[in-house]
Amino acid sequence: MPPVLTETARPSRRRTAERKSKTANQEKAVASHALEILEQHVLLDGFRIVLDHERSRGSYLFNAASNSRLIDLYGFFGSMPVGYNHPHFDDPAVQKELARAATIKVANSDIYSPGYAEFVETFSRVAGLPPLERYLFIEGGALAIENALKAAMDWKVRKNIAAGRGERGTEILHFQRAFHGRSGYTMSLTNTDPRKTDLFAKFKWPRVSNPAIDFSLPQAEREADVIAREKKCEEEIRHFIDERGIDIAAIIIEPIQGEGGDNHYRGEFLRQLREICDENEMLLIFDEVQTGLGTTGRMWCSQHFGVMPDLMAFGKKVQVCGVMAGPRLDEVPDNAFRLPSRLNSTWGGNYTDMIRSTHCLRIIEKENLVENARVVGKHFLEALQQLQSEQPIITAVRGRGLFVAFDLSDPKKRDEFWKGLFDRGLLV
């Protein structure tokens, strides 16, 4: 029997440890250099994280800046559909297809391809929401909203012209604490952090109070409170309609407000908005850029409430942004989804994103990930509710699927809490 070497006497293991230490230090140096280069030209106001793409996998982000893993509950602002380096993408044929797609950026608006058609077919089959069967694809969630607004304005103004009321109907009714983007028309809707909208030109479109459920209240008081605030909001909406109804093209709402504070609505309220739009010749627009593609345990959050919008904006997890339009648009024959060049862009969405999205959609379908989001989200919610009962610092636990949140008493405690989680390997 050969002599047994102690840990310190094993030169091969010692050299391996030294190599690992050297490699880790080299990687930290590379990460530090990346940050130094970026800081010369870019405002670095995000996380001090440098992504190691190769070593990130599943729910784990590998941070090259600290040479450590993080459990990622952030997911690139909720835009990660299947995690890091899903095994599906290890298939050489899949890698070849993605690499080929990345070599050129196709102008999908004018040049068509089998890859584009395959994406549209897969998206329609896996994530389609009949009767919203007309699609527009574009790069960026804000531009998806922009084009939904343009389609609504076009529809309303053409109706007003046909009725002899003139070229009117471009206002969009929206809600306090809404976030719909940071470009053009969306600046007139977004009203969360004033740093994102102050001093930029905006329209004075009708803005109403936000009757979100107050989860900080005891269960016994919660329903009466939200019903009272829904009634107040309805009065505000009807006041604007009485005042300038023919000028209002649409009502837009996030089925759950994201940046505004994870604000949830009752299904009764969303159904009431549907009725108001039907009664007053307005379109209902749902912004599902953040809530869509399974996050809430249904493919689209609106499916929880049985409410069908006329226009729905999507993005983030889909990887490609855009708008779905329903049959009500066809009350105007030459609507924006039928008239050539009325809504358009150079790229018509991103071809490489479409190829990747096709594969992500197949994974979601094959692995039943929407149902998984419901099951795992329920576990998260129940565990947080239990924690809330034990730790008074945590309040207002709420969630639908994996769209889960809770409150802390003030920004200082929130920041301390966040850092504590980060230091323990959890990114939220």
Image (tube, helix red, strand yellow):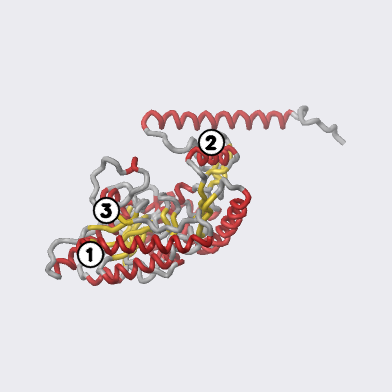
Q: Where does residue 50 sit, x and y in percent of width and height?
A: 49, 37
Q: Of discs 3 and 1, which sits in the foreground?
A: 1
- Circle 2 crowding by C-alpha within 10 Å: few under 14, some 14–19, many from 20: many
* Residue 367 in sight: no
- Separation of disc 2 and disc 3 at Cα? 37 Å
Quarter holding residue 274: bottom left
- Separation of disc 1 and disc 2 at Cα? 58 Å
Quarter holding residue 335: bottom left
Of the numbered discs 2 and 3, the one sitting upstream in the chain is 2
- Circle 1 crowding by C-alpha within 10 Å: few under 14, some 14–19, many from 20: few
Q: Looking at the picture, which amino acid does disc 2 mark?
A: Ala
> Is residue 288 found left or right of 152 in the rendered image?
right
Residue at numbered disc 3: 345
Q: Looking at the picture, which amino acid does disc 3 mark?
A: Ser
Kindly state the secondary structure of the residue where label 3 is placed.
Answer: loop
- Separation of disc 3 and disc 1 at Cα? 36 Å
> Is residue 330 found left or right of 364 in the rendered image?
left
Residue at numbered disc 2: 64
Q: Looking at the picture, which amino acid does disc 1 mark?
A: Asp
